[in-house]
C-alpha cells in the first residue's frame, strides 16, 4: 500500500490557504483516481483505491498541521509501510516560488513544523516528499499570517495549475519511480 498524505488544517476557515495546499492536491488526486476521501481513521480522512496497478491510500490528517506525524505514523504502522519506498507527503513550501514543484527522496523539515512532526514520529527523513511552492512571505509580513492567508490575483490560477501538476508528479513517482519524476518535475 502506497500512502499519499497531503498536509493541511481541518477547519473550513483554512480552506484555500497556502498551508492547505497538500489537502488540495489530495482533492485533485481523488478526482483523477476516482477515490473518495471520506472515511475516518488514523485521525484523518482517507480513501483507498488504485493508481495504475498500485494500491494507494489518500490521507488528509485532521490533527492540524503541526501534529501531522501522529496521523501519518498511525497509517504507516497499520499498513506496515516501508516509508522510504511507500510514503509520499505533499505540502506547501515558502522557499519555492508560487506554483513551483520540487520532489525529494529525503531531507530535513526545512522549518516546516508539519514535516518536523512527521520526521519525529517516523524516526526518519527518508521518505518522498512533493513540495509545492507558495512563495516567500513579503518583507515585514508575519510567516504564520502568510501561510494561513489566501492566494490572490494571478497566484490563484498559478496554484490551480500547480495542484494539478503536483498530482501528476505524485502519479509519476508511483508509475515511473522517484528519480524519473524528479528529472521531469524539478526543472
Image (cartoon, helix red, strand yellow):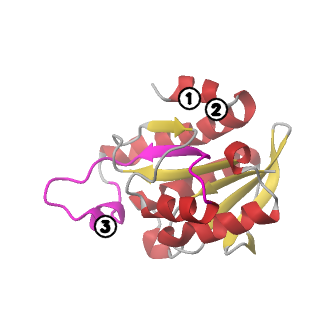
Which label is found at residue 88? none
Spatial CA span between label 1 and label 3: 29 Å
Q: Is residue 9 visible?
A: no
| Precedes in sequence: disc 3 or disc 2 | 3
Whether residue 149 is in magenta: the answer is: yes
Spatial CA span between label 3 and label 2: 31 Å
Image depth: mark 3 or mark 2 in front: 2
Secondary structure at badge 1 equals helix
Q: Report the residue marked by disc 3.
A: 144
Residue occupying the point 63% across, 40% down: 170
Viewer-side residue, 92 vs 123? 123
Viewer-side residue, 117 vs 11? 117
Drawn side of residue 65 relative to residue 85, left or right: left
Residue occupying the point 28% across, 67% down: 145
| Precedes in sequence: disc 1 or disc 3 | 3
Q: Are marks 2 and 1 in contact (CB under 8 Å)?
A: yes
Drawn side of residue 102 relative to residue 79, left or right: left
- Give the prevailing secondary structure in the magenta stretch: loop
Q: Residue furthest front?
A: 123
Quadrant occupied by the C terminus: top left
Spatial CA span between label 2 and label 1: 6 Å
Q: Report the residue marked by disc 1.
A: 182
Residue 172 falls in which quadrant of the image? top right
The x and y percentages for residue 137 are: 25, 54
Q: Report the residue marked by disc 2.
A: 178
Amino acid at each position: 500500500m502506497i500512502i499519499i498524505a497531503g498536509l493541511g488544517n481541518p477547519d473550513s476557515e483554512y480552506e484555500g490557504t497556502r498551508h492547505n495546499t497538500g489537502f488540495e492536491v489530495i482533492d485533485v488526486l481523488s478526482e483523477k483516481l476516482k477515490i473518495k476521501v471520506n472515511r475516518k481513521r488514523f485521525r484523518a480522512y482517507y480513501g483507498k483505491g488504485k493508481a495504475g496497478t498500485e494500491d494507494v491510500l489518500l490521507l488528509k490528517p485532521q490533527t492540524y498541521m503541526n501534529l501531522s506525524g501522529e496521523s501519518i505514523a498511525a497509517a504507516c504502522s497499520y499498513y506496515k509501510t516501508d516509508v522510504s519506498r511507500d510514503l509520499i507527503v505533499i505540502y506547501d513550501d515558502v522557499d519555492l516560488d508560487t506554483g513551483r514543484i520540487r520532489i525529494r527522496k529525503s531531507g530535513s523539515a526545512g522549518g516546516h513544523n508539519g514535516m518536523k512532526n512527521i520526521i519525529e514520529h517516523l524516526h526518519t527523513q527518508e521518505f518522498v516528499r512533493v513540495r509545492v511552492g507558495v512563495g516567500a512571505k513579503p518583507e515585514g509580513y508575519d510567516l504564520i499570517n502568510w501561510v494561513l492567508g489566501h492566494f490572490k490575483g494571478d497566484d490563484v490560477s498559478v496554484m490551480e495549475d500547480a495542484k494539478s501538476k503536483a498530482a501528476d508528479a505524485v502519479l509519476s513517482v508511483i508509475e515511473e519511480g522517484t528519480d524519473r519524476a524528479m528529472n521531469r518535475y524539478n526543472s
